[in-house]
Image (spheres, grey):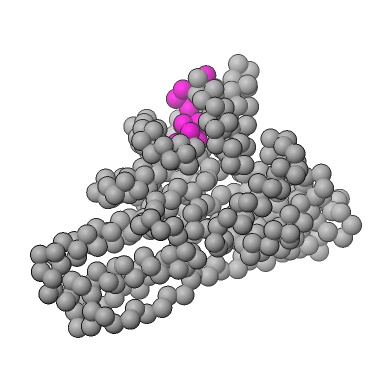
Amino acid sequence: MLHGNLRLPRLAAVLLAALAMVALPALAAPADDLREAQKLYTSGRLQPALDKVDGYLKATPRDPQGRFLKGLILTEQKRTGDAIQIFTGLTEDFPELPEPYNNLAVLYASQGNYDKAKSALELAIHTHPTYATAHENLGDIYAQLASRAYDRALSLDKSNASAQVKLSMVKDLFSSQKLAAAGTPAKADPAKVAKADPPKVEPPKVEPPKPEPAKPEPVKPDPAKVAKAEPKSEPAKTEPAKTAPPKAATGTPEEAAVAAAIQAWATAWGSKDVKGYLAAYAPDFETPGGEARASWEKARTERIEKPKAIEVSAQVKSIKVTGNEAVAVLRQNYRSDSLKSSNTKTLKLVKVGDKWLIKQERVGG
């Protein structure tokens, strides 16, 4: 199960971190277009987001952030060939960035081209050795290649019990991953590109995204034991991986109350408690793009209810309380059966009665 991450993980800081030229007044309007395109993309309005980012790229055609966002939009629109062209161009113009290589691998894998996917992931790891998502995806590619090799061995010798057992174990591995994600579409091994933030680029060098938290690797079977196993033996059950609880925030009682409100929001989101999730937002919450609150709530409800399972964690990095207002910076990790992302998010909260509610949320610190 491949993961795109524009930390891509993937998809990892603010989408609109600017090149030096962006500070010029002449580029203020295009920068606004990019912000608007990101808001439209985040709310799932793909075609308006594509139109807006195309307008931005007319003024700044080489901008990596705009091109990166366009690649994400095209991927979600299932325009795989066009998305591959965008990410390939980014690897040529910015070879030091690992995220475009990773997304290329996801797209190649969706076409069944595992050799190209493997090469792209190796380049991603070469540019950023601590890029955990690329390592995980590379492991999945190796498993797919192994499955093909065992299939070939069985087609040449159907009595090869050892190859049959190994093929069964590889398939069980992916079956376990699907169970851990509470189910995936029927199509075999769908490639998944997460919604996340494009890499932050500043001249004269590109700052790589922060590395992801290390993920536990699955226990590999002993080859000696595999050879002796019976072909029809029942595979061991695999329990879904559990997200480690975030560290409790420390500080003043009000800071602790803000941290508790954030964890309650993340818990409601992860448990698909739509009512509890929406209740975490203030009545005057600033919706993305200024859309109507009812439209925003309807879109969020659909995005929460559609996946079969969701995992969300919020690791609070800092909290600043000023009177009845607070600003919190956190690391948000999200995983569902169709998306995976990790990014930095800033929440502005207000105290309403005895509750801290979210007034504004944006990606980035």
Give the residue at x 48% y 33%.
Answer: 70
On the rendered image, what quadrant is the N terminus found in? Answer: bottom left
Name the image quarter holding residue 154.
bottom left
Q: Which residue occupies the foreground of this view, 79 or 2?
A: 79
Residue 66 within the segment the image draws in magenta? yes
- Asked if residue 99 lies left or right of residue 293, the reply is left
Say if 89 sits above or below 160 in the image.
above
Say if 61 sits above or below 119 in the image.
above
Give the residue at x 48% y 42%.
Answer: 76
Q: Is residue 296 visible?
A: yes
Give the residue at x 26% y 80%.
Answer: 232
Percent across and percent down for residue 243 are 55, 67
On the rendered image, what quadrant is the C terminus found in? Answer: top right
Percent across and percent down for residue 306 are 58, 55
* Number of disc labels: 0
Residue 259 within the segment the image draws in magenta? no
Tell which residue pokes out farthest to the left in this image.
156
Q: Which residue occupies the foreground of this view, 54 or 305?
A: 305
What is the span of residues highlighted in magenta in the rendered image? 59-71
What secondary structure characterizes most of the magenta part?
A: helix
